[in-house]
Image (cartoon, grey):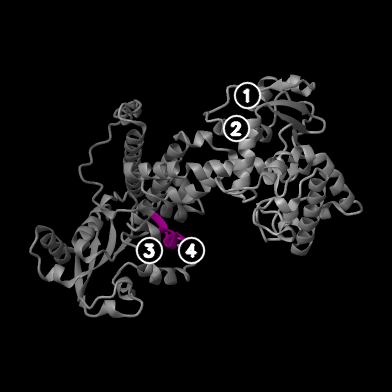
Amino acid sequence: SRKVWAKFKNRKFTRVLDPSAGEGHLLAPLVEMDRYRWDKTVPIDCVEIDITRHPILKSKRFNVVGIDFMQFSGAALYSHIVLNPPFAEGVKHTLKAWDILFDGELVAILNAETIRNPFSAERRMLVNLIEQHGSVEYLQDEFLVPDAERKTPVEIALVHLEKVSNFEMDFLSGLEVDSMTSSGLAGGFKELNEIAVHEGMIDNSVRAFNAAVKAAREQVFATAKARYYSGLLGETMESLQSKDSNQSRQAAKANLETVRKEMQELYDNLKNRAWTGILRSTQVTSRLSSKAQQRLEAEFENVKQLEFTVANIYGFILGLINKTSDINLEMCLDVFDSVTKYHSENRCYFMGWRSNDAHRRAAFRIKTTRFIIPGHADDGWRSSPGWDTTRFLADFDKVFAMLDGKREPEVSLQWAFTEHYARLKQGERISTSYFDVRYFPGRGTIHFFPTSQELMDRLNRLVGRHRQWLPPEGEKVPDAFWLQYDKAEKFSADLEKEIAQVNRGRSWWDHIDGNLDAMEDSKREKAVASLNECIGKVLRKHGIDPAALIENQEPQQAMLPLLAA
């Protein structure tokens, strides 16, 4: 691979493309060289048809911008391209790379027979390019070295091509006497109508993106020409008298490096805008909670590196659809944790299903009669809820509508707090589709009274099964297990008394029903054991033998630690 990089004449790498990157082995010498650059890291784009290799490339901080190079349009302005394509596709890939190269160099590793036996039109075209724009070096046994990704004894051809654009052309050709007015200069501009939507939003988005890239390229080139012309005219009197006249001359200088940099910045910005528009317009995202949206947007940092094409957009949306069940589960977990994680009063504990892990968190459900959420205080002057409160309520609306099989609730929590905030602040109880709510602005607490026990049970069971607090669907379970699970909220008052006795004299951080995740391992183990003991006492008080909860377990084994989140 070092011989590949030694072929380049221009050692100033501004942006590099590897169209068949594999795991990025061919890029290793550039990464090593880049370690010693003082100015910036060289952006490296990769195209790789094997998607299982994408995580490896991303872990090396390469940008995965495409899957199939033959479908790649390559709007970015690359200074260097390195290719190690499959030998059967070598000619096509090299010609494609030459086509998308604006001004720069490429080096391709090809089968030597490809050049020596130009029997096809494509091979003859490549041979002509080499004769006019480059060179070829033949090497034997280069793919038999230990670190070769594809070991083969075949002789290879190292093809180097250099394309020089006509960017620095004679700008003075065809100049005429200046007779332009301000209206004349703008005479070719017309208001642009919106792109028609009859062929679908995705097709239109790609057309708009391509049009924007074309316009941006024309803008950058026109600006460069303007700099060139103005430079021929010389300096203004003010700039000549300025101490920074030399810097201003340098800034006005038109050169390919400046054009490439400006075009790349505009292209990246347009691609970011285009992918963001797709992300924000999909129906899936309208149902996402705030945390689910954040998780998706974190993954979107990788997605937006892809080329903006119809195929890539459909692939992205299909990936979202395939992940819908996982996204929905994560949203339910977020809401469940927002109710229970820091508010033990909202939990009702039960003896969890099989586990031998003493370090795991205790099993619990959300209370279905009432739960209280703090942290939403009002300063007194507000006429509407704060942004955090509004977002929190919107998350509840989305999750419970999803559990109900609907896109959105008929009467949402967000609507209730927006339209009836004054009434809520006065202590009134407002009804929504899934909850009655009361608000205590001084304390900053919202009291939720669920109106659908079925949906609350659906949420509790979904989370319980995911966290293995409940047995898998269809597994045979003793009646006593479900009895203590169903009665957990009824038993909660007795359990709270037992827990209070254990907590007496302890600091808040050592409470056995507190935030167990924040405890040290040894303390958490003791806290879970104490909590299990309290649950066992309450169950016996109500005539339920803890040993009978788990089928085929000996009595002394039945008091197992509660399962974790």
Sequence-earlier tag: 4 or 2? 4
Crowding near the residue tagged with mark 3, few <14, some 14–19, many ≥20 C-alpha atoms within 10 Å? some
Classify residue 436 as left or right of residue 184.
right
Q: Magenta span has 57?
A: yes
Q: Magenta span has 225?
A: no
Q: Which residues are magenta?
A: 54-64
Q: Are marks 3 and 2 in contact (CB under 8 Å)?
A: no
Crowding near the residue tagged with mark 4, few <14, some 14–19, many ≥20 C-alpha atoms within 10 Å? few
Q: Are marks 4 and 3 in contact (CB under 8 Å)?
A: no
- Image disc number at residue 490: none
Residue type pointed to by label 4: Asp
Closer to the camera: disc 3 or disc 1? 1
Measured in 3D between alpha carbons, the distance from the residue under mark 1 to the one under mark 2, in whole angstroms, is 9 Å
Classify residue 391 as left or right of residue 262.
right
Crowding near the residue tagged with mark 2, few <14, some 14–19, many ≥20 C-alpha atoms within 10 Å? many
- Give the residue pinned by disc 1: 433
| Secondary structure at numbered mark 1 | loop
**Residue 42 appears in view:** no
Residue type pointed to by label 2: Phe
Residue type pointed to by label 3: Phe
The residue at the point 38 percent across, 63 percent down is 13
Measured in 3D between alpha carbons, the distance from the residue under mark 4 to the one under mark 2, in whole angstroms, is 52 Å
Measured in 3D between alpha carbons, the distance from the residue under mark 3 to the one under mark 1, in whole angstroms, is 60 Å
**Residue 443 appears in view:** yes
| Secondary structure at numbered mark 4 | loop
Indicate the quadrant where residue 402 lies: top right
Residue 181 versus residue 292: which sits nearer the camera? Answer: 292
- Give the residue pinned by disc 4: 39
Measured in 3D between alpha carbons, the distance from the residue under mark 3 to the one under mark 2, in whole angstroms, is 53 Å
